[in-house]
Image (spheres, rainbow, N blue to C red):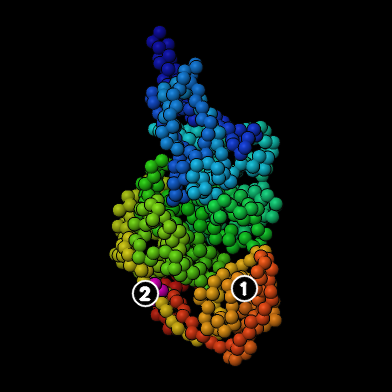
Amino acid sequence: MMKKNRITLFLVLASMLAMADAPYRYRIDLVNVVNDKVTVVLNPPDIKENEIDFRFPAMVPGTYAVYDFGRFVSNLKVSGKNGVEIKVSKTDVNTYHLSPANQIESIQYQVDDTFDKCDLPKTKENIIFEPGGSNFEVGKNFAMNSHSMFGYFSGYMNQNFELTFQKAAGFYPSTGLSDITLGEAQDVIKVSGYHDLADAPIMYFKPDTATIQVANTKVLVSCYSPNKLINSGFIARTLNTMLNAQKDYLGGDLPVSKYAFLFYFSDKPTQSGASGALEHSYSSFYVLPEYDSLSLEQTLRDVTAHEFFHIITPLNIHAKEIGEFDFNRPQMSEHLWLYEGMTEYAAHHAQLKGGIINLEQFLNTMMQKYQNSLESYNDTMSFTYMSKHVLEEKIHTQYTNVYEKGAVIGMCLDILLREKSKGEYGTQNLMKDLASKYGKHVSFNDKDLFNDIEKFTYPEVGEFLRRYVGGHEPLPLQSIFAKVGIAFTKESFTQEFSLGNPDLSFNAKTQRLVIDDIKGLDEFGKMLGFKKQDELFAINGVELTTDKIREVISNYYNNLREGDEVAVAVYRPKFFKGHYKLKILKANAKKVSVVRKNQITLMKDLTDLQKLTLRRWTNA
């Protein structure tokens, strides 16, 4: 009798534990899609409360903008157990208040894709950057960011999730998730907790995939190209050298065992007008234009190198605002310079150290970023202040400076560390030390980070961070570059030949360079008589075809002598749209005064410390 009671008690406890551990069970129909809407059905976990909020995210990590994904959910219906009526009230665009919550049997709703939706409230004004949204093309491709598809119950974010996808024949899921059971008509994907679910995009289509083994990590490359201009094999070959360079940059091993690159190539302009990617802990999702593959090689390397390095930060180095991210009332961290700026710097620096690009190419990239930061952003705004307030409308315009000045901050910090350590310690070492101190499950306090970095390094590094990242002072490029024997000149004046200095763009229809603006014309440009909307056709009788523009202009400068007659053929628009008149503009060549800003040159005589720091910084 006693034994029987123990068995009964054990069964009751086991039953209670099973109930407590009941997952969210989602069913997603990717076959019967109507008007770009996918039907989703949820059987909830075991809810104890009488009242509860069912939410969709307002924002997700990595986007730095409030998108309100609840806008794309419609026809939400809640069924109660044994016919119990569930009261539903929508308290904001992302939240449904439900009662009695402990009697919910199922929730059904439809979700719109975001790529081409513009008839929902505030959709035109608040377009979701495509890599952060979803796209449904029946019979072709379903590109899904989980945060735009699935909701969660307040207080129940750590339960397991079980996703059952009803799919078309031959379709296959590409994702960074690992717990996948495949079937002919449906697949089951399991994930632990809402944070991990929201961190995992999934792409369904007839597979074009390739795999690369990089040290301890299996890398999946999944490619959807509607016109088959690009394939996964090409991408894998393009990324292989870069990924191995990143592996070496990180010390030979990677902190993840599986990683997925998910590529969606579009043959039409995006609604946002942009292209790019969104990083995740074990994957990254890309929406890029479908060009001929060879023209994409360096773009692919640059953008994937950046996203892949996010496996270090914020995956393994992050503030509490990220580690405990609030999807509906987000708080921002002060350290975007670390999450995005250091990542962007490492993406290019790893290519330099891996021999994929040379020092000149690397420095040109860094100096272009520096110039962009001065021309397009507020150089006196504290980076930590900008990061903390990035969701505010007046500050948000400064956000993309993390990819410009943020990368230059990374370069300065790396050079400073190399010089102080006589070449032995750089940002590669610092990031590894910070990842060891914190890690995926331990967050730092924003206010402690500079002090923690100083403890790992030197007082001068702490001072640099407080003055130039937390403070308002311009970056000290002259003194930083001097540490590696590079002379930095803020401004210089020279006499040079020119082509008039018009602002140029490209007319894709006529395949010609077009003059957008003549406000900046120099004396020679005025002598030639350029007008706005002139389209350049030839220089000294040599046609400016798209494949020869660089060569023709280079030959022009190399062969020009003072007083030579210069003839520039332009097509000038006539009164009727699409009609042009060919005109030959002539003037005698003469040098004009040119202002060169932010120029760098290698010093002639370097000290032993400068040589050592330069060599260890560049791996030369």
Viewer-side residue, 427 vs 321: 321
Locate residue 137 relative to residue 129 in the image: left or right.
right
Q: Which residue is mark 1?
A: 534
Location of the N terminus by quadrant is top left
Viewer-side residue, 83 vs 616: 83
| Residue 566 located within the stretch drawn in magenta | no
Upstream in sequence: badge 2 or badge 1? 2
Tell me if mark 1 has few (under 14), some (14-19) or many (20+) residues whose alpha carbon lies within 10 angstroms of its own: many
What residue sits 64% from the left and 82% below the top?
585
What residue sits 66% from the left and 65% below the top?
577
Identify residue type, mark 1. Answer: Asp
Instruction: Report x, y in % for residue 510.
Output: 68, 67
Instruction: Report x, y in % for residue 84.
Output: 47, 18
Q: Which residue is mark 2?
A: 479
Identify residue type, mark 2. Answer: Ser
What residue sits 57% from the left and 84% below the top?
527
Residue 319 visible to the viewer: yes
Decide: is 71 above or below 248: above
Exactly how many numbered labels are in the figure?
2
Decide: is 100 above or below 228: above
Instruction: Report x, y in % for residue 183.
Output: 65, 33
Instruction: Report x, y in % for residue 445.
Output: 32, 50
Q: Which residues are magenta?
A: 477-482
Q: Nearer the viewer, mark 2 or mark 1?
A: 1
